[in-house]
Amino acid sequence: MAAKTEKAAKGRKVLIPLVAVALGFLLGSIVVLLTGKNPLLMFNAIIQGLTGINIATGGFNPRHIGELVIQAMPIILTGLCVGFAFRTGLFNIGAEGQLMMGSLAATAVALTVKAPTFVHVPLILVAGMGAGALWGAIPGYLKSRFNVHEVVVTIMLNYTALHFNNWTILNVFTSVDRVKTAEFPTTALLKDPWLADLTNGSRLNWGFVPVILAVIAFWFILEKTTFGYGLRAVGFNKDGAKYAGMKVDRNVVLSMVIAGAFAGLAGAIITTGTFSFGRTLSSAEGYGFDGIAVALVGMTQAPGILLAGLLFGVLKSAGPLMQSAGIPREIGGIIQASIVMFVAMKLGIERILDLAKGKRAAKAALAATADGVGEVGV
Amino acid sequence: MSFSLILEMFPIALMFAAPLVMAALGGLFSERSGVVNIALEGIMMVGAFAGASVTVVLEPLTPLAPWIGLLAGVVAGMLFSLLHAFASINLKADQVISGTALNILAGGMTVYLCQILFHQQRTRAFSSGLRKITVPLLEKIPVIGPILFKEIYPTFYVAMALVMLTWFVVFKTPFGLRLRSCGEHPQAAASMGINVYAIRYAGVIISGALAGLAGATMVLTQDIQYTVTSVHGAGFIALASLVFGKWSPWGVLGAGLFFGFAQILAYYAKDITFLAALPQEMFYILPYVLTIIALMVFAGKTVGPKAAGEIYDQGKR
Amino acid sequence: MAYIIEMLNIVKDFPGIRANDDVTLQVEKGSIHALLGENGAGKSTLMSILFGLYTPDGGSIRIRGETVRITDPNVANELGIGMVHQHFKLVHNFTVTENIILGLEPRKGLMIDVRKAASKVAELSKLYGLDVDPNAKIEDISVGMQQRVEILKMLYRDAEILIFDEPTAVLTPQEIHELIGIMRRLVEEGKTILLITHKLKEIKEVADTCTVLRRGKFIGTVAVKDASEARMAEMMVGREVSFSVDKGPAAPREVVLEIQNLCVRNNKNLLGVKNLSLQVRRGEILGVCGIDGNGQTELIQALTGLAKIESGSVLINGHNVTQLPVRQRLDRGLGHIPEDRHRHGLILDFRLDENLVIHNYGKAPYSRYGVLDFTAIRKNAERLIEEFDVRAGKGPATFARSMSGGNQQKAILAREIDRSPEAFIIAQPTRGLDVGAIEYIHKRIIAERDKGKAILLVSLELDEIMDVSDRIAVIYGGEIVGLVDASKTNENELGLMMSGSVRKAV
């Protein structure tokens, strides 16, 4: 039968992604081999991206670690975004759009508000979270009120956010060169030359602090609060939750609001940490889909999402390293997608096993007493 | 709005509409068999990549290169969709997750192959994709002649033919009846001796073929090469067209044309006086917002195949 | 004696239970043969074997004198066996004709020959007196007509042997009458009919022979015209003397739960509960027995607030709770052990201790300012586990999903009893449980009665009702057809009422 205790379930939750990751890297290595390159070079690049250590030459460059954190931060947050909604039974494909709205709000506050850093930065982050939350509320509301499936709505809102962002940057904040706005005042930035020096010139910024707080908040809300209890109940068994008196509709909207806030925070951090200005975007940058991958591979648990975010982050940050070793950087994307597929398949395989065991047990139960209730009776 | 403006706009709208219609028809086959296929976007990317690559490689050898490119798109789409079929039907994975994973995979895989084959993150530009044609006699028909038959990409006619073919197959043939039964009530179909797994495989593979064709069409009529942004959401708009068109081939045609027009409105807004004042981005957003509204209006009435998205387990009766 | 069907010494096991224990069924060609038994007797399993949905673990099957192995429904079809399922397998937005020809479509070139299909359907329909509209959509036609479509599906495939699984369960009296006429017509045309049912009156009206099963065992086959309803009822429910639970006499006081003229629609939009009235007093257990599908589910759902009440009222301690949502009825003193413990009783993916606080997790001491106090929650679980002897592998941290059915039920019981409700509605409390768990749960229910609760016990197990109840109400066709003192009745009387043959003044 499925895991008997929490400990066993946790064990399974670790095993599935580990196996999937191993298989993903195996597949990636095969692809690299088939196209005439050496997989060891790929692994060397990844290790270098993760630790800064170059196994081949023995050198150490902390800059890679800084870049890893930069790449990991936004997708950890979008992973939290997707994961939070998932735990409540919702498919939030809209992390990308929620992130963009967060970016936009951050830009707005950065350019229009004048305040000292310790006020300005938190304000920006809160604005980002608020905008993301609002953008998440839309599909939440449509789902609870009209029962519109959130998948297509959130995808449509992604594109809407993209164009809305561009229009606002171009027309409200009068971009200088049609690509970016004016530079933000230094009070608005998460950047810090001290951090950059520490990591030998990487783009590391203070954004990692709110990210860690967000991970803790995710865990705390879901596992420790009554609100989280209700959300998890709805995600597991809507009928049972309704029967116990929980307000399912209200929870759906609130869940999307919180999820959107996570993504909005990511947008704010990117805008004032990695960059220092607002930008127009020619297309979605993929943080949303990365977030889905992170949430799935992290099994929608806080520590898992953190680790998966770091893993996929290094696949990105090691890209240039791979490229200079002659391996196209897109292998990272292929590995990432494969890992997701394997996790999806593993969950599918699990489901078959559970169904088979559950069915036999259910048949026995039915056979013992009832007749023809629902399925084939006795 | 002058007639000459319409004359200018129509062919471009048809050019935008054709791939949307093709991909949406693919979604129709898949969903009507009971499998939700969110990966239309990814399959289109794969088809576009295949189409562009084959065309640029065969160009110096034959003038038929773009047509072979289209065929390559079909084949590539079919192969790629096998992954979704296997994951959702055999392994009973959640269809939305499987589809999303494939979209991510398509992005990575196509650009990776570009790097290997062309040493850049895009395919090499081909000098000419498909050529527009003018149908000899039909173009002389007053009013609709110049709109529908003059300087139109032949893929639009292919799309029209596919619409009619789809209508015929799905609603008039035994295969179509069985396909629809698997999407509405797979247990009933199984009790009549129908192999639900086989039918669903067929549905997904056909959707792969059509979406692959759509992707190849898109790159060969609207671009000069394949890049990771070549498809930019058309696969999702095709999904929306499916809902908007209420899962019927003619509805899909209408919805596709509608979205095609919505897309070019952005370019022509400045020529239409009462629209000129509005910001360009609003027209970009238009198709997406319209989709959301369409979903709100139609969602209450379950018009989609009743069992689409549900995992079919042969054991359950 | 030309047997068209012979199922000889059939044995079928499922994990933990022998569903068919050496059952022999012999049916003559051109007859209507009924298969009678209570819930859990083995009727559906036997017929599923005949139709190829299961394979037997022992015994053999002969069709028209030849031994066969029926491995799947297609083989059964080829042998001329067809089944009209209890839950129709019709595509709701296809037409009648499309549903009938699905899988065996007549062709004209690449297309379906629609005209040929329609004419064949019309022809069959006329021949067997099955009135259908070939072009109507399933979702638009009556249940009776839907059933006729199911019958036509079989006839279109030249079925000679037709199995009907509880066919009258979903029909109005008029439609039942029509169906009986159809069955006679089919037999006139040379078909053989197998009728799975628990309704004695119908057996008497239409069947030639009847095989009775009880708890998987073959009891006997009788010629219907020679057997009385009483005799058949006795064969259906009679058993060895059952030990009764140690229980003192009841001392009922005032009425706590009052149900007045209740009408509830079922999911087929017919009245599942018709003008039902009952009263449950403080300190008594009122048992409601009946064959599944006679309104029990609708009654419980209406009482607990999960289904809408069409008309009538429900009062708890004098308060009218008819319009109140679930939560508020619980607050007014309603307790409920749900029929479906997995769907409504527990969140299987939650831990045991989390499940035990599902009604009051938002209040102290289980939470403060919105934050859960897991120590308090765990202590509560430990207390209840101790008191109610709930066995869970790793104590409060065990996932509900991995607990055995008996212990899941004990957990639900513990939770509900701990809330000390005034009116306790208990549905199917021992479904799927072993003897030990059953005994324990019965003891606890009686203990609650002695504490002064009013208990409405709804069960499909006649044993349970008779052992535990003080008074017994019999439900048939959505109505109470009998209300008796438990000590003054017996299985046979109840059996007759349960199968609709007898009505005792209520």
Image (cartoon, helix red, strand yellow):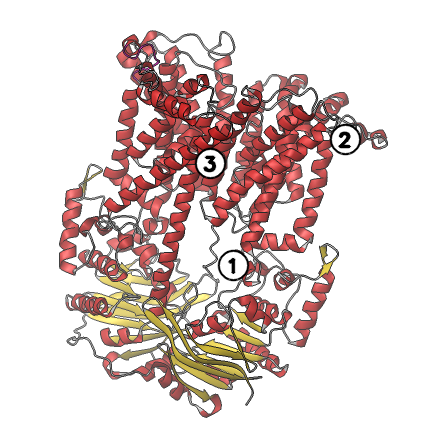
Q: Is the residue under label 2 in contact with that under label 1 (CB below 8 Å)?
A: no
Give, as a three-letter code, the residue at label 2.
Leu
Along the polypeptide, which appears first: circle 2 or circle 3? 3
Query: Horizontal placement of A219 versus A173: left or right?
Result: left
Q: Residue beneath label 2, please?
A: B148
Residue C11, percent from left and from top = 40, 75
Indicate yes or no whether the magenta region holds residue A296: no
Residue A306 spot, x, y in % from top left: 31, 30
Residue A339: quadrant of the picture: top left
Give the SS element for disc 2: helix
The residue that appears at 71% across and 32% down in the rendered structure is B155
Q: Which mark is residue B187?
A: 1
The residue carrying pointer 2 sits among few (fewer than 14), some (14 to 19) or many (20 or more) residues within 10 Å by Cα, namely many
Residue B57 location (% of width, % of height): 66, 25
Element assignment for label 1: helix
Question: Can you identify the residue that label 3 sits on?
Answer: B101
**Foreground label between 1 and 2:** 1
Distance of label 1 from label 2 (alpha carbons): 45 Å
Q: Quadrant of the C terminus of chain C?
A: bottom left
- Stretch of the chain drawn in magenta: A198-206
Question: Mark 1 is on which residue type?
Answer: Gln
Where C40 falls versus C412 (above or below)? below
Report the front residue among C254 and B158.
B158
Using a 10 Å C-alpha cutoff, classify the residue at mark 3 as few (fewer than 14 neighbours), some (14 to 19) or many (20 or more): many
Q: Amino acid at mark 3?
A: Ala
| Pointer 1 chain | B
Left or right for C16, reference B290: left
